[in-house]
Image: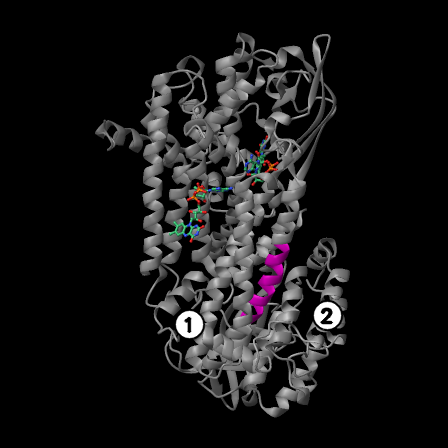
Amino acid sequence: MRSNVISYLKVFWGFKMDFELSNEQQLLKDSVSRLIADNYDLQKRGAIIKSADGYSKTVWKQLADLGLLGLSFSSNYGGFDGGPVEQMIVLEAFGTGLLIEPYLATIVLSGTAIQSAADENKKSELLSAISNGDHLMAFAHSERLSRYQLSQVETRAQLKNGNWILNGEKTTVLHGGIADTIIVTARTKGSDRSTDGISLFLVPAKTKGITVNSYPTIDGMQAADIKLSNVSVPQNALLGECDKGFLIIENIEQHGIAAVAAESVGAMQCVLDMTVDYLKTRTQFGRPIGDFQVLQHRAADMYVAVEEARSIAIYAAMMTTEKDTEKRRHAMATTKAQIGVSCREVGQGGVQLHGGIGITEEYAIGHYFKRLSMIERQFGDVEHHMTTLSMMDSPD
Amino acid sequence: MELAFSSEEIVFRDEIRAFIAEKLPESARKNGGRWPHWSKEDVVTWQRILNEKGWAVPHWPVEYGGTNWTAVQRYIFIEELLRTPTPEPLSFNVNMVGPVICTFGNDEQKKYFLPKLRNLDIWFCQGFSEPGAGSDLASLKTSAVKDGDEYVVNGQKIWTSQAHNADWIFALVRTNPNAAKPQMGISFLLIDMKSEGVTVRGIETIDESRHVNEVFFDNVRVPVSNIVGEENKGWDYAKFLLGNERTGIARVGLSRERLGRAKKLAAKLPSFNGPLADDPQFKRKCATVEMQLKSLEITIMRIIDRQRRRNDSAPDPATSMLKLRGAEIQQTTAELLADVAGPMVAPTGQIRAAYEGDFPAELEETLGIIPHYFNSRAATIYGGSNEIQRNIISKGILGL
Ligand SMILES: Cc1cc2nc3c(=O)[nH]c(=O)nc-3n(C[C@H](O)[C@H](O)[C@H](O)COP(=O)(O)OP(=O)(O)OC[C@H]3O[C@@H](n4cnc5c(N)ncnc54)[C@H](O)[C@@H]3O)c2cc1C
Ligand SMILES: Cc1cc2nc3c(=O)[nH]c(=O)nc-3n(C[C@H](O)[C@H](O)[C@H](O)COP(=O)(O)OP(=O)(O)OC[C@H]3O[C@@H](n4cnc5c(N)ncnc54)[C@H](O)[C@@H]3O)c2cc1C
């Protein structure tokens, strides 16, 4: 495994083991961090959560103007040809501010779908539209009883008179309520659990027959349950090859995993920093509580958990471009399992060491804990990925 | 030595079950599965039903409305309530201030308060913690200065659960700021929340509910007769109370109820091969919790039994073990349930409104899961954090 990682890193960072950021990458990190620091204190975030759309058009525009939305898309479609490291830098910074904008839904999940499956026309149309911030998208895949089984798709699509007719129900679609275009996965053949026979469709949100029930999620984001009743879209709404959508979906999830891994590192680092700070300032029994060794050790374990997550997030970033499907699968399952373990240890530890104040809405730590708790359950939890891994051969 | 429930105990358990089945009001039954669950009215109504039957305070001395039940029967009773679940008899009344008044109160206090505590005519809250006095409770600053036949109380409490529903507060106050040890200058005072100068401010918690509050005292005048026991002996009563709180806080039945719900939900959800409920990993996790609960359950009964035979009011450091493990297992089961639900935990309660009256009933069941999990994180903080319980065990039992 070690030689493997090193070889990836070597390829990526110009044939040497180098974890330092380049000047451009450092610049990127600084500018995103500044944007977050200036625009995203807890109070402003709270106001955005309570606003009608649940995201800030102003912040979204700023992200577009800084070139962050199109960062990882090809310059052929108005992007900046950024690689996985750039993406990681941005998401880590988003994690420090607990950004609730529709970046994961629009850029990471939908963007990956389009990049990996759309034809040239759609790519240039949609990628530039989402890069400049004018167009929002959502990825509607999960269903009420699908849990983490990616191939569990009961929503149906049938070709009738040259149109696709979609019927079914999608649940907790991230930012589904504000999307202009929704990517819907549906079964075009086979049984409910078969990997063969799933297809993806580009569906304008305003299409007749779509009912969207949108609500805030526990981590301050937005999601929607989307009902499709005889939704009719033209034949060219099909995204990628008919029946062969499973690999695309898996690829979307893998990019999602790499993204939340990076985001969680930013969030966990904040939890650690806040906690260490609190240990130094909160006094009980006439001394800072950081004097108590049991708390020092728990903080030390949290530190280790953050560093493990950081390493695995780097690994994930590298492996998103791995061509061998099995290797990539293994890497992403490994990543998400480690991220889940770290999120739990750091999130719960942060709350515990803060005592009562840790469970209040007024104080930041609880908000980080909630986002980390959600990330644990996004794209598969620890048990899910550990089971996946136990059914695979280790590539090392 | 006898570990299985005897046939009499089984009969007893069935009697309790039948009573609950017959008498638990529909609203309380329904709200048990929701979040936030019981309304104040649910709690009051149920406790009055129990009180009418003579079961509101089974562990109190018979002369004050208790029963002659054995430790095992008392345990069976509370576990049956928890696993149904029904609202619990208000802990502040029946497990905390009630036993303190029974043991240390004067006759007038007993006569006035005990019947009202049983019947929940008075709802008490617990005013111990302060912003600067959490784990280090003895450093509390809220002062009570004698002025004629009244105390004048000034200061602030925090994390006061249910203060917004409470009629009275039992507070630890400093009556002697110059005592040799801070513990020796504290008194146990009963304060009417309607007194002039008492202000309550709610604190929203991460489960987006209101459980806890800040309570401010600004020149609140309290009759001297509201002090329990002797002036400056409040710390002893508080330790007695905390010991009782720790026994009551383990809540094995609550964990069992959650485990049952986790299994039921897992039967509906897919894993790799068939339902999650059949997944060997999941079954193993459930078995682990069941093992832990069995050990805890028997440990609780051993400690209750020992206390009963010892029959004194000195605190038993072994109760720390019950609080420690009980809280951890509560967290494990809340976590297990949240893990089963997985991505279904995402929506906040506002999803009900999003559906505009069309809300699917089966979603109600998963809605309470994540607030429960968030809230369970407090279990290792309140009632003395787990770090503090470990300190007590290592000092008080192991002599370190
Ligand atoms: C297999 C082996 C190989 C070794 N090889 C070498 C070697 O090559 N060169 C060499 O110099 N030494 C060597 N050591 C010695 C080793 O460094 C010591 O055993 C170690 O420093 C612990 O000291 P101790 O055994 O006196 O235990 P103690 O220091 O007495 O510790 C007893 C326990 O108390 C804990 N403890 C002690 N202080 C603290 C503290 N401040 N906070 C919290 N917990 C504490 C310890 O973690 C331990 O659990 C070796 C030991 C072993 C077992
Ligand atoms: C939901 C909830 C309900 C509550 N209800 C009530 C109530 O009704 N009435 C009431 O009076 N109080 C109530 N409390 C308060 C509760 O008892 C305190 O939160 C608790 O005592 C911890 O105090 P603190 O929050 O100030 O944390 P701190 O004491 O500041 O502790 C912070 C961290 O330091 C650790 N720590 C502190 N001292 C030590 C030590 N010596 N060694 C090792 N670690 C240490 C703690 O374990 C914790 O992890 C409630 C709290 C919560 C969260």
Residue A138: x %, y % from top left: 60, 73
Secondary structure under the numbered disc 1 in the rendered image = loop
Most foreground residue, B270 or B47: B270
What chain letter is assigned to the residue under label 1? A
Say how many tags the image has: 2
Q: Main secondary structure of the magenta part?
A: helix
Q: Which residue is mark 1?
A: A152
Q: Residue at x 69, y 79 (%)?
A: A131
What chain letter is assigned to the residue under label 2? A
Residue A265 is inside the magenta segment: yes
Q: Quadrant of residue A244?
A: bottom left
User: Can residue B49 be seen here?
Assistant: yes
Judge from the rendering whether residue A292 lies leftward or rightward of residue B397; answer left or right: right
User: Can residue B318 be seen here?
Assistant: no
Dot 1 amino acid type: Gln
How many neighbours does mark 1 have within 10 angstroms: few (below 14), some (14-19), or many (20 or more)? Answer: many
Dot 2 amino acid type: Trp
Q: Which numbered tag is attached to residue A60? A: 2
Q: Quadrant of residue A372?
A: bottom right
Is residue B69 shown above or below A223? above
Secondary structure under the numbered disc 2 in the rendered image = helix
CB contact under 8 Å: marks 1 and 2: no
Q: Quadrant of residue B186?
A: top right
Region in magenta: A258-271
Residue A176 is inside the magenta segment: no
Q: State the separation of the CA atoms marked 1 and 2.
A: 33 Å
How many neighbours does mark 2 have within 10 angstroms: few (below 14), some (14-19), or many (20 or more)? Answer: some
